Amino acid sequence: MAIHKFARLMWEDKEIPVYGSGESRRDYTYIDDIVTGVLGAVRVNPVYDILNLGESQTISLLELVSELENALGRKAQLRFLPPQSGDMEITYADISRAERVLEYHPTTPIREGILKFARWFLDSRQAI
């Protein structure tokens, strides 16, 4: 959701809100990897289980914006705001159980995923 929001704001020459320093880190996962995990869960069909799907690799908010700038060929306008109460500095999925149970192994690194997203995003803008 953040990647699409940031791309849209960049495309519309609007500011991207950055809470805190922009050094918070998140685990972004390409949709194809999530679909693979969901299909693996359907295949395995456990009676009941809790599994995390994700990439388990993190990227800072500022690095993410930079990658989007490169992929879209647009410069972001950042608006730094105070940190949000309760926001975590780093979040990521522990996928070790999904790796064991589902043989889940994400294959799309964040930078590759951003390039794929940017191609889709730019194509969808041309279709309008």
Image: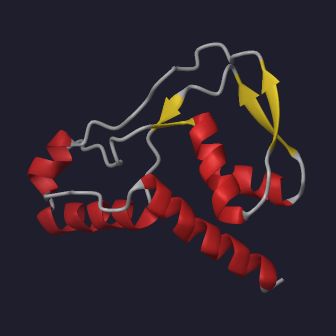
Residue at the far right: name it: 13
| Residue 83, horizontal then vertical, whole percent | 69, 16
Q: Nearer the viewer, residue 115 or 26?
A: 115
Tag count: 0
| Residue 57, horizontal then vertical, whole percent | 36, 41
| Residue 11, horizontal then vertical, whole percent | 83, 60
Q: Nearer the viewer, residue 108 or 46?
A: 108
Look at the image and tell me whether residue 4 can be seen. no
Which residue is pictured at 65% across the width and 13% down the height?
Answer: 85
In which image quadrant can residue 52 be found? top left
Does residue 107 appear left or right of residue 59 in this picture? left
Does residue 101 appear left or right of residue 69 in this picture? left
Look at the image and tell me whether residue 96 can be seen. yes
Does residue 68 appear left or right of residue 110 in this picture? right
Q: Quadrant of the C terminus?
A: bottom right
Does residue 42 appear left or right of residue 89 in this picture? left
| Residue 127, horizontal then vertical, whole percent | 78, 86
Q: Is residue 103 above or below residue 86?
A: below
Q: Is residue 78 above or below residue 21?
A: below
Residue at the far bottom: name it: 127
Which residue is pictured at 55% across the width and 60% down the height?
Answer: 114
Which residue is pictured at 46% across the width and 63% down the height?
Answer: 112
Q: Nearer the viewer, residue 81 or 49?
A: 81
Q: Is residue 70 above or below residue 82?
A: below
Q: How is the image coloured?
A: secondary structure
Which residue is pictured at 79% across the width and 47% down the height?
Answer: 76
In which image quadrant can residue 10 be found? bottom right
In which image quadrant can residue 33 be found? bottom left
Q: Is residue 25 above or below residue 12?
A: above
Residue at the far left: name it: 100
